[in-house]
Image (spheres, helix red, strand yellow):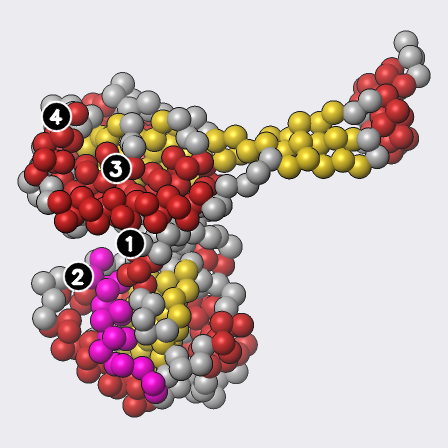
Amino acid sequence: MLTRLNLTGIHPKRLSEELPRPIQLEDDTESVVSSIINDVKLNGDSALRAYAEKFDGGAPESFLVSEEDVEEAIMNCSQDLKSALSDAALRIRTFHKSQIREKKNFELDGISVQTIHQPVLRAGCYVPGGRAAYPSTLLMTAIPAMVAGVEEVIVCAPPNKSGRIDQATLVAARIAGVSNIYMVGGAQAIAAMAYGTKSIDPVDVIVGPGNVYVATAKKLVSGDVGIAAAFAGPSEIVVVADDTVDPKLAAIDLIVQAEHGPGGMSWLISWSDEVIESILNEVSILAEESPRLEDIRSTFETGGYAVLVDGPEQAMDVSNYVAPEHLQLMLEEPSQCLKKIRNAGAVFVGEMSPAVVGDYVAGPSHVLPTDSTARFASALTVDDFLKDIHIVEMDQEALTGVADTITTIAEAESLNAHALSVRLRIEGEK
């Protein structure tokens, strides 16, 4: 089910020539998404209703989920699920509290600079739906915003096949402390949160994963609204395994990310052909038993690879080129590979540390960079909802000490008023 690649003997500088190129967007993806965004900007709720009719089978009476619906979801939710969501929320909240930075004071030559960290006023979280329910994603996006101190956190999520937002997602919203939940999905939800409609007020920052249309919409509205640097699209994993691995465990972890659906990526890398063969045999067996077989097949067909390499060093060269969302090191001695990691959203070490732990309870947000953006981007953090504001204060003596530096540079830039602003203060010039 995975395409085989043999990279043994390939020089590191030639790896990029031998490896498959990232899946490119269809030619019309950006134009389709751009059209949706412009429609929502111009027509607001009426555009949202039209897209709900087109994509969801009908528009709701109100996009805002009522308090009665949330209460009903809580009443109908099993105690086990409520306890599990509460436990996950506690772990996520505790981790993100550790990311909060204290305000800092800096002083040099009498110039005092205080750095304060102020949250944005409103944040919007996109939570995927349709194919599956993702209450975990609600927790992983809303809780970091709440910990950052955002005053109002809203959620947009598409309806499921029954025409409602999944009940578990509504329960998660209550546990996280979300202000409002709107039944709007797709690129149109991103546009609504970015620019506002009569029903949905615009936000300052939008976060959350989604399909290629959602991810592309976030890319197109960035600059008008804050967007985390990562392209949080379809799920990805690279598993690096040696001959100590349990092939069934490696196989199931390749399947885990593939079952999210098309557009994702599942790569297996090893320097043992026997290891690759044994894992692929288990992949075939386990995939056939999955109720999401079609989604798994779709991912494997377009983004599934089994790569034979010379050894650990080349394995990490390949992984760093791919820059996966999840990197799983299923090795007896992982230290050599850990030292070579340059590009990865999150790394899981050892057979007892599967990526699913990161999906639910490890603490860091599972909203991670995909589509090779791990080359420059990181997981969603508290900082994605914060702005640094610098407060500068000094007296005349300190200003006099830097006056020559300021005026010399200002005059070199032909900005005479800049220079005069200093001279008037220290010389009393008219």
Give the foreground label among 2 and 1.
Answer: 1
Camera-nearest label, 2 or 3: 3
Q: Quadrant of residue 125?
A: top left
Instruction: Please give the name of the residue rendered at 82% of the width and 19% of the height, measured from the top-left corner.
Output: 421
The residue most toward the top is 430
| Residue count near mark 4 (Cα–Cα under 10 Å), binned few <14, some 14–19, many ≥20 | few
Amino acid type at circle 1 is Tyr
**Residue on which the image places disc 4:** 68
Q: For the residue labelled by badge 2, is the local secondary structure a helix, a strand or a loop? A: helix
Is disc 1 in contact with disc 4, using a CB cutoff of under 8 Å?
Answer: no
Pointers 1 and 3 in contact (C-beta within 8 Å)? no
Can you tell which mark lies on residue 360?
Answer: 1
Q: Which mark is residue 295?
A: 2
Which element carries disc 1, helix, strand or loop?
Answer: helix
Magenta stretch? 243-260
- Dot 3 corresponds to which residue? 175
Foreground pick, 368 / 415: 368
Q: Amino acid at mark 3?
A: Ile
Apparent side of residue 392 relative to residue 300 in the rendered image (left or right): right
Of helix, strand and loop, which one carries label 4? helix
The reply to whether discs 2 and 1 touch (Cβ–Cβ < 8 Å) is: no
Q: Is residue 53 above or below residue 371?
A: above
Q: Nearer the viewer, residue 344 or 41?
A: 344
Task: Name the kind of residue labelled 2 in the image.
Answer: Asp
Q: Earlier in the sequence, mark 2 or mark 1?
A: 2
**Number of the front mark, 3 or 4:** 3
Number of residues whose C-alpha sits closer than 10 Å to that of mark 1, classed few (under 14), some (14–19) or many (20 or more): many
Q: CA distance from mark 3 to mark 4?
A: 16 Å
- The tally of labels here is 4
